[in-house]
Image: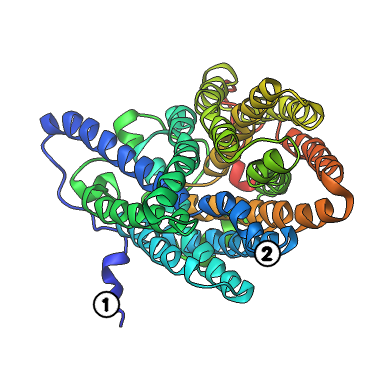
Amino acid sequence: MGNLFNFLKPAPHIKRLPEEKIDSTYKRYRFQVFLSIYIGYMGYYFVRSNFSLAKVYLIQEGFTKTQLGLVASALGMAYGVSKFVMGNVSDRSNARYFLGIGLILSGVTNLFFPLTSSITVMFMLMLVNGWVQGMGWPPCGRIITHWFSDKERGVKMSIWNTAHNMGGGLVAVISLLGVHIFGSWKGIFYLPAIIAIVIGLMYIVFAKDTPQSVGLPPIEEYKNDYPPVKVENREKEMTGKEILFKYIFNNKYLWYIAIANVFVYLVRYGIGNWAPLYLQEVKGFNVKESAIAFSLFEYAAIPGTILVGWISDKVFHGRRAPVGVACMVGVAVGVFIYWQSSSLLAINITLALIGALIYGPVMLIGVSALDLVPKKAAGTAAGFTGLFGYLGGQVAAEIIMGMVVDKYNWNGGFTLLMISSVLAIVFLSLTWNVHDRSKPNLEDIQAA
C-alpha cells in the first residue's frame, strides 16, 4: 500500500542544471507553476461557492435558511479541519499531485449533490466536499514559498489570492450557464463540477513541486534572499510532529492571526454567501441583478488585494497588520452602508467596496502564516489559520448567521457582522510590528 502512494511524496531532487541555463529555466518555471496554482485554485472555487447561488432555488423547493445554513456549514467544518490536517500532510507531499487530486475529487462530489433532496445526505456530501477542498490552499502555499522569495512574497501572494475572486466571480456566470444548459438549478452543480475535473487533470500535467525537483537551486540562493525565521536546514523535510510542536503551537503571533481569521471570515462569508438571498429578499433585486452584484463583490477584490499586498511589502516592509487593520475599518463602514442603504447604485458600490477590502486581510493573514514559519512548514501554518477561519468564521457565518436572521431578521445579522469587524481589528493589532524587514536585527519569530 505504501508503494501505491509513493507518487504523493515530495519530488526527489535531481542533478542541477548548467549555470547558464538556470536563470532562463527558473523564469519559465516560475511563470508556469504560478499560472498552474492560480488556475488550479480558481477551479476549487467553482465547486465551493456554487452552493450560495443555489440557495434561492433550494428555498423555493421548501428548505429553510437554517437548514441551508446547516448544510453550508458542513463544508466550513470539514474544510477547516481538513485544511489543517491536509496542510500538515501537504508539507510532506508532492504539490503537483496533491492539489490536482483534491480538485478532481471535489468535482466528482458536486456531481452527486443535485441527485438528493435529503438534508442529511446534502450535509454528508458537503462534509466530503469540504474535506477534499482542504487539499487546495496548502500545496499552493508550499509552491509559493519554494518558488518565490521572502521579499516578493506579499506581492506574489496578493496576485495569486485574486484566484479566490476570479473563481468566486466566474462561478456566478458558470452557474447561470449551467442552469441554461441543463434546464434546471441542478446545472449550478453539474457544469462547475465538469470544469473543475478538467482543470484538475491539466494541473497535474503542468505543475511542478520544488525548484530542486527540476534541477534548479533553492529560491533563497537564486534570489539571495533569506527569510528571518531561523531554521538549521531550510531544505530538510520535517516530520509532522516537528512542524506542529516546534513551529506552530508555540508561536503566539500565529495564534493571534488565527483568532483574527475567525472574525475576518465571519464577515467575508456573512456578506458573500448570503448576498444573493439578501439582495433578492430584502432589497428587491432579481436573479440577474443579484448575480451581477455578487460578481462585483468578488471582482472588486482583485485590484484591492494586489494593492494591499504591494503596500504591505513596499511601504510597510513586510508588516501585514497595519494594512489589515485599515482594511477592516473600511469593511466596517462598508457593511453599515450596505445594510442601511436602499439605493441600487449605493448597494452595488458598497458591496464592491467590501469585496475590495475584505480579501486584503484574508490574503494578509495567509501571507503572515507563511512569514512566521520555515517554508517546509508553510502548509501547516496556512492550515492552522484556515482551521480557525473556516471552523469558526465560516461555520458561524452559515449556522449562526442563518439562525440570527431567522430569529431577529437581517438587522440582527448585520449587528453580528459589525461586532466581528471590530474583533478582527483588535486581534490583528496584536501583530502590529511583526515581520518588519526595515529593522536590521529581526526578532527570531520561531521563538516568539
Q: Residue furthest top?
A: 315
Q: Which residue lies furthest to the right in this view?
A: 408
Residue 177 in the image: state x and y as whole percent: 40, 45
Residue 355 in the image: state x and y as whole percent: 61, 31
Residue under circle 2? Answer: 62
Q: What residue type is labelled 2?
A: Gly
Spatial CA distance of label 2 from label 1 is: 46 Å
Which of these two is toward me, 347 or 71?
347
Which of these two is toward me, 122 or 82?
122
Color encoding of the figure: rainbow
Residue 237 image-quadrant placement: bottom left
Residue drawn 28% across the image and 35% down it: 30
Residue drawn 63% across the image and 47% down it: 273
Q: Is mark 1 on a helix, strand or loop?
A: helix
Which of these two is toward me, 16 or 272?
272
Residue under circle 1? Answer: 4
Can the viewer see residue 85 in this picture?
Answer: yes
Give above or below for 170 relative to 83: above
Give above or below for 288 relative to 138: above
Give above or below for 315 relative to 160: above
Residue 2 image-quadrant placement: bottom left
Does the residue at mark 2 contact the one at mark 1 (Cβ under 8 Å)? no
Query: Badge 1: how crowded within 10 Å, few (<14), some, or many (20+)?
Result: few
Query: Badge 2: how crowded within 10 Å, few (<14), some, or many (20+)?
Result: few
**Quick one: label 2 or label 1, which is nearer the N terminus?**
1
Query: Which image quarter holds the C terminus?
Result: top right
